Image (cartoon, rainbow, N blue to C red):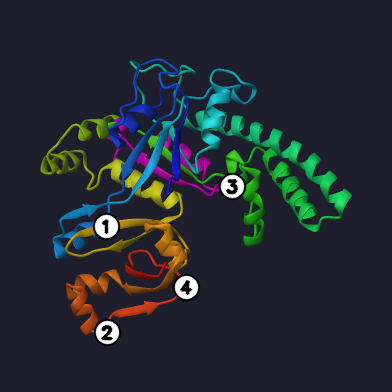
Amino acid sequence: MALQCGIVGLPNVGKSTLFNSLSNAKAQSANFPFCTIEPNIGVITVPDERLVKLSEIDKPTKTIPTTIEIVDIAGLVKGASKGEGLGNKFLANIRETDAIIHVLRCFDDENITHVDESINPVRDKEIIDTELQLKDLEGIESRIQKTEKQAIAGKDVEALKKVGLLKRYKELILQGKNARELDITTEEKKLVKEFYLLTGKPVLYVCNVDEQAIASGNAYVDAVKDNVKNENARILVIAAAVEADIAELDDAEERQMFLEDVGISESGVSRLIKDAYNLLDLETYFTTGEDESRAWTYKKGSLAPQAAGVIHTDFEKGFIKAQVIKYNDYVNLGSELACKEAGKISIEGKEYVVQDGDIMHFRFNV
């Protein structure tokens, strides 16, 4: 499931430092704008304590976690929507992603140049918001003209609905707001998918702070929180430079001691990966046994055949039924046999909605 989160932000806010901490695919990190030109793609392991527990119980030959893709995109500057800087490239790269991790600089350091020569994360956020909004507005106006013609010529009811929705988005964006802030129905969500709105993508704002502000934040973080309080978005406080230091430590105990020294229990990178996973509206089911314990990614709300198709398309095509054990039952009872004896295994059909943490075995016929 090749869903991607794109890391965006102004130049020199810590994007590449953060990406380096997330992935072994090292992005160049330098103290000048546009040091990242081509988008770097990292395949990131998603930490999941449940998979660790299943592996401890079954002691399999292999343990395979699930992954997501993170893309480090070139820094954007004012005027990008008109092609300034690497604007066209930036906007094309971000259009291909499924969600946005927007890094904001929330620390002072006179040795690291800021493109606008002062620290103001709210201003930085609004620069990128404006560029994305302008690009969305351009696309919306073009689509309204085209869709109105279709609606009038063919008396197309669905086209009329699209025009009405597009006009609502246009009005919202002209107010300086992002498309994700519009309250729409389930039916309208299906229509909006084909609009490809940049500001409609789910977003996680990452406040990049210094070591002193990891646990409690600072005035810059408070300003960001106030600015996005009415927006449908998440916020994460992280110190990218500290995460880079943690990433250099090979020993798990050393990493934990480092975390305790700076006053946190879990690394920012771990929290970021989990948040990115949730941002993409993803959940996990497991298969486990003597040979392998494995986490599988599926889109939240998927039915059993769709989830089976994540393993192999033949599983979905020939789906018969699914054997399901709830994670807590498996952990508490300690084996599949014990779950069977306790009546904790259910047999589900094609209409079963898979739940996060389900342990599944599929029966199929091709």
Q: Of tags 2 and 3, which is closer to the observer?
A: 2
Q: Amino acid at mark 1?
A: Arg
Label 1, secondary structure: give it. Answer: strand
Residue 110, image x, y percentages = 35, 16
Q: Which mark is residue 343?
A: 2
Q: Examine the image and state in which quarter residue 238 appears.
A: top left
Label 3, secondary structure: give it. Answer: helix
Residue 130 versus residue 217: which sits nearer the camera? 130
**Left of 152 or right of it: where is 208?**
left
The residue indicated by pointer 4 is 350
**Left of 124 or right of it: where is 330?**
left
Q: Is residue 184 magenta?
A: no
The residue range painted magenta reads: 212-240
Q: Are marks 3 and 1 in contact (CB under 8 Å)?
A: no
The residue indicated by pointer 3 is 180
Which quadrant does the C terminus fall into?
Answer: bottom left
Q: Is residue 339 above or below residue 223?
A: below
